[in-house]
């Protein structure tokens, strides 16, 4: 079979001299007084927002860049940065670009040993930490990283100290430094989240960000270039997804706010009122599940479920180009007042689009939010592709897919359906790792390790990870994601890992969601403060998990269906080492740490209690 390939030419001509700093300079020239950021306004009791214009942001960037220059940071030096998602993150990012330096982002949840590896491997000579707690982690491994000359802590006022020290540096010196990098030069060194072993440093160039921002701004024109476009970032800016959007927003003139504490997300959405959101599927699942459990607690669970069913049906009919029956239209109008309108208001009332990435969303949630008036534009990409390679567009969108190829990008399927990417977004190489770089490319095509399929119109669907395909003892190939994603959508399920490689049948390890569990327990006549251990053994909880598994099993053949499961009395978190910072499961670590639980599933002969109903 010949490879299936879709390639879209760039709509903006490449500029081999351009760098990321140019994007801010161009924005200030075009709209100096446009609000580019908003920060919490403490004068208004912490509920309001104060705008920062493009010109004001550039002045702050230059002042901090002078501080870095005065501190001895030379063009090309690597500077690491560990912090949460705040305005200061992008301020530091652009200040380093203007100083000619190369940022090495570190996830703020990283352990001391992970920080040590990234600092050593990258050759960073300084690190900026947000908090005293971050600085303490760095202090633990300070003796292991002799190249680090400076540790600056934002909480201690070190950014102000840097700015003051840079007052003597002239504007011409910063202009010289910010103009040194050309498109082909390294812009940043981002370490992969390490779901399959030790993190590798991805060398992303100025070209990757500049050309992708310029072309994506055209492709996503309705999202980022409408007057008054704004977004509230809450996913980590250390990840390429939010980092790219931050840079795209500067180019496109989108006002950006930040909320690092997801527990404060709903109040922040209510006061900031963004026009679009950037999120991972888990966020949309939480919004949906919280609304459902809240309705259940208020005795309106039946109404909510009927509203959700109507919303999904209404959106599906519209996507298929079919006529919506009068009865459905009447119910939809009623539920819009009772349910959908309230959810829209909870998200600030102005959200029209949401860009989703990092894991499959699932058609159910896509259709549900679409009926709320929020079009979720699901996309696909990796650190190695500077985030997006494909994305659904405002005028060209299909729920259940990750969209068409972006301008300037090519995507093809290899003989085994592995997705390969080339174009303006593909990284240069793995840092100091020529073997890994060579293994990752077939000519100029980057091998993603993901399996996918195209429809006739060029919409890509992701079907799984190449390395994660399970082959049962009977030789049946099973993609875990097809089963895991619908199960994870259940309110009480935290995470799920499907197992069964070289085993007689498919089974699953399940963890419970400690945030959603108390509400669900209370709604089902059980003590809300039940421990995870007791909940894992509770018959009603097991019944609910079985229900989620039955739903997932309906989408596969009986040979692929989950026959047994176990509920673990523990959580998988980033801190426990079982999730990456973007909340993807580290399958290899889980399989190692929970080998006994997996063995137990196969030690006892399978009985009929957990056999699929939908096989």
Image (cartoon, helix red, strand yellow):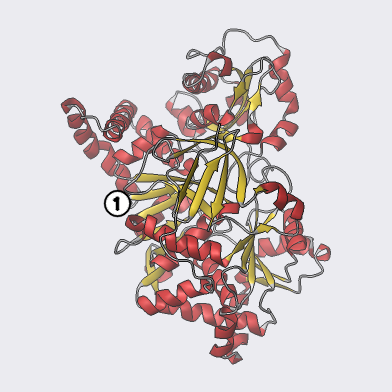
x and y percentages locating residue 355 in the rendered image: 42, 49
Q: Nearer the viewer, residue 505 or 269?
A: 505
Give the residue drawn at x 79%, y 70%: 147
Which element carries disc 1, helix, strand or loop?
Answer: loop
Instruction: Using the image, determine if residue 307 lies above or below residue 275.
Output: above
Marker count (numbered)? 1
Quarter location, residue 601: top right
User: In which quadrant of the rendered view does residue 82 lie?
Assistant: bottom right
Query: Which quarter of the rendering shows the N terminus?
Result: top right
Q: Nearer the viewer, residue 121 or 143?
A: 121
What is the crowding at mark 1: few (fewer than 14 residues within 10 Å), some, or many (at least 20)? some
Q: Is residue 433 above or below residue 100?
A: above
**Which residue is tagged 1?**
349
Residue 77 in view here: yes
Q: Where is residue 400? Give x, y as percent.
A: 42, 35
Give the image location of residue 546, x and y in percent: 52, 19
> 131 or 254, which is in the foreground?
254
- At horizontal 50% and vertical 79% (from top left) the residue drawn is 60
Q: Left or right of 49: which side holds 91? A: right
């Amino acid at each position: 079979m010949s490879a299936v390939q879709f390639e879209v030419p760039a709509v903006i001509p490449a500029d081999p001299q351009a760098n990321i700093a140019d994007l801010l300079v161009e924005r200030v020239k075009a709209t100096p007084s446009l609000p580019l950021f908003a920060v919490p306004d403490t004068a208004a009791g912490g509920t309001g927002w104060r705008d920062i214009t493009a010109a004001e942001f550039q002045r702050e960037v230059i002042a901090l860049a002078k501080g870095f220059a005065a501190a001895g940071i030379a063009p090309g030096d690597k500077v690491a940065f560990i912090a949460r998602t705040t305005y200061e993150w992008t301020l530091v990012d652009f200040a380093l670009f203007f100083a000619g330096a190369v940022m090495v982002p570190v996830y703020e949840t990283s352990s001391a040993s992970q920080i040590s590896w990234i600092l050593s491997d990258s050759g960073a000579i300084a690190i900026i930490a947000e908090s005293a707690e971050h600085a303490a982690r760095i202090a633990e491994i300070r003796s292991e990283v002799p190249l680090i000359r400076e540790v600056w802590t934002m909480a201690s006022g070190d950014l102000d100290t840097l700015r003051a020290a840079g007052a003597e540096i002239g504007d011409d010196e910063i202009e010289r430094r910010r103009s040194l990098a050309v498109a082909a030069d390294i812009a940043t060194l981002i370490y992969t989240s390490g779901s399959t072993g030790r993190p590798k440093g991805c060398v992303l160039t100025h070209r990757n960000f500049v050309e992708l921002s310029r072309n994506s701004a055209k492709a996503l024109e309705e999202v980022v270039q409408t007057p008054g476009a704004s977004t509230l970032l809450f996913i980590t800016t250390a990840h390429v997804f939010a980092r790219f959007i931050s840079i795209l927003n500067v180019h496109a003139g989108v006002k950006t706010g930040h909320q690092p504490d997801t527990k404060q997300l709903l109040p922040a959405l209510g006061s900031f009122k963004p026009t679009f959101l950037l999120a991972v599927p888990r966020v949309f699942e939480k919004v949906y599940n919280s609304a459902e459990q809240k309705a259940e607690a208020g005795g309106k669970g039946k109404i909510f479920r009927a509203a959700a069913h109507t919303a999904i049906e209404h959106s599906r009919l519209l996507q298929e180009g079919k006529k919506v029956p009068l009865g459905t239209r009447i119910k939809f109008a009623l539920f819009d007042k009772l349910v959908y309108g309230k959810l829209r208001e909870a998200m600030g009332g102005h959200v029209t689009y949401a860009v989703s990435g990092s894991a499959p969303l699932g058609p159910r949630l896509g259709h549900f939010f679409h009926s709320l008036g929020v079009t979720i534009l699901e996309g696909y990409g990796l650190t190695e592709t500077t985030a997006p390679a494909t994305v659904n567009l405002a005028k060209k969108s299909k729920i259940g897919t990750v969209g068409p190829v972006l301008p300037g990008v090519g995507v093809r399927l290899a003989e085994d359906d592995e997705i390969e990417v080339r174009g303006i977004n593909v990284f240069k190489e793995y840092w100091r790792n020529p073997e890994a770089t060579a293994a990752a490319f077939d000519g100029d095509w980057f091998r993603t390790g993901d399996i996918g399929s195209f429809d006739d119109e060029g919409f890509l669907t992701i079907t799984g990870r190449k390395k994660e395909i399970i082959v049962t003892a009977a030789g049946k190939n099973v993609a875990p994601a097809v089963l895991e994603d619908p199960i994870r959508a259940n309110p009480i399920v935290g995470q799920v890992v499907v197992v069964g490689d070289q085993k007689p049948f498919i089974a699953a390890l399940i963890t419970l969601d400690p945030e959603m569990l108390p509400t669900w327990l209370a709604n089902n006549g059980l003590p809300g403060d039940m421990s995870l251990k007791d909940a894992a053994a509770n018959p009603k909880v097991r019944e609910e998990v079985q229900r989620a598994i039955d739903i997932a099993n309906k989408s596969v053949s009986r040979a692929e269906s989950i026959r047994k499961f176990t509920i673990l009395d523990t959580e998988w978190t980033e801190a426990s080492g079982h999730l990456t910072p973007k909340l993807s499961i580290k399958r290899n670590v889980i399989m190692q740490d929970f080998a006994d639980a997996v063995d137990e599933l196969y030690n006892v002969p399978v009985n009929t209690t957990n056999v699929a109903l939908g096989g």
